[in-house]
Image (cartoon, rainbow, N blue to C red):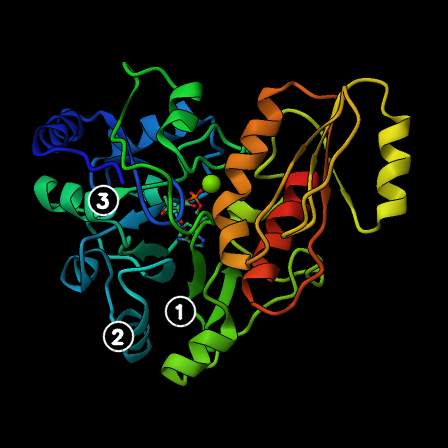
Amino acid sequence: MTHPSASDIGRAVERLRGGGLVAFPTETVYGLGADALDADAVTRVFEVKGRPAENPLIVHVSGVEMARRVVSSWPGVAGALAGAFWPGPLTMVLPRAGCVPDVVTAGGTGVAVRVPDHDAAVALIEAFGGPIVGPSANPSGYLSPTRAEHVRERFDEETVLVLDGGPCRTGLESTVVDLTVEVPRILRRGVIDASLILEKTSVEVDEPQLPDEPEGAVVSPGVLGPHYQPDAPVELVTDIARLSARLKECTGRAVLLSPPGRSVRVQPPHEAINMPGLASGYARRLYAALHEADAKSPELILVVLPVLKDSPVWEAIRDRLRRAAG
Ligand code: TXA
Ligand code: MG
């Protein structure tokens, strides 16, 4: 495991204090950090990512105490969820405090907060001494980065200082849950699902059927429309017969992501990337595999859609794959 040194953290803090941007590792994906209370610094995050101004950012904090500084109320459910899942891949939307600039929440009255489960991220926030925003450190719409090199491939070091913490353990973005409504609801799926929340906290949350949500369903602005997409087109296949047919039709190179836990061989010029069989391993590997596939500039990336249901994580994986396929 790669650990940023104290001097790496020191340089990153200096960058943040100067209003600059730092990519930092978390357990989910790399975040693009800036001082959350500095509107100009946050505006640069939007510019550098090419992110639409109406898509709000998650504020990363080192613990409950700092979280309470950026919200105007801390209901019992927030305490219960934080107690069960922080630090970890759960983001809560709560009424925002006055110190949070408009640009962070896209003008909205709710602010999203989470404590990342990664020593380097927490060390950075603590050394900086305040909250930092952290959208995924990718150009808007592209695949999320799960390794430092994914960030370096897309941004130069002048613009974004990268704190290398090695590969991300979880590999899928955090679950986003809205606590500003009467019945808490999940806005973005992640490895923490409604059943786990109920089991650990007895809190009931609504889980919209994503991405085929009923019309008018509330979802996070950032999960609407195409997202998490490589440059090459992605096509999902569910059966092997269809897969062979698509490979034959493809005149250029296709890169295939295998069914979970099954190794497959394909004829050149096509290539295959074998995917892990366990949901946690598949999730950890997913974005790196899609980055690898995309780097080959293929005509098509074919993914055998996992149909497994032995873990709720598969649901989040299918969600991201459907979005990658657009
Ligand atoms: O795991 C993660 O959440 C990563 C790491 C770096 O922490 N961050 C991340 O940020 O995925 P981003 O910006 O790529 O996705 C944040 C999601 C978007 O869908 C955004 O619309 C939603 O959270 N969101 C942020 N603030 C919100 C708010 N105030 N109300 C509703 N949704 C919000
Ligand atoms: Mg993102």
Classed neighbour count for the residue bearing mark 3: other residues with Cα under 10 Å, few (<14), some (14–19), many (≥20): many
Q: Is residue 40 left or right of residue 52?
A: left
Secondary structure under badge 2?
helix
Q: Nearer the viewer, mark 1 or mark 2?
A: 2
Residue 1 at least partly seen? yes
The residue beneath circle 3 is: 121
Q: Amino acid at mark 3?
A: Ala
Q: Which residue is mark 1?
A: 179
The reply to whether discs 1 and 2 touch (Cβ–Cβ < 8 Å) is no
Residue behind mark 2: 79
Q: Earlier in the sequence, mark 3 or mark 2?
A: 2
Marks 3 and 2, how far apart at CA: 22 Å
Residue at image point 47% right, 48% down = 284
Marks 3 & 2, CB-CB < 8 Å contact: no
Cα gap from disc 1 to disc 2, whole angstroms: 11 Å
Residue 292 to residue 312: above or below: above
Q: Marks 3 and 1, Cα distance to the nearest angstrom? A: 24 Å
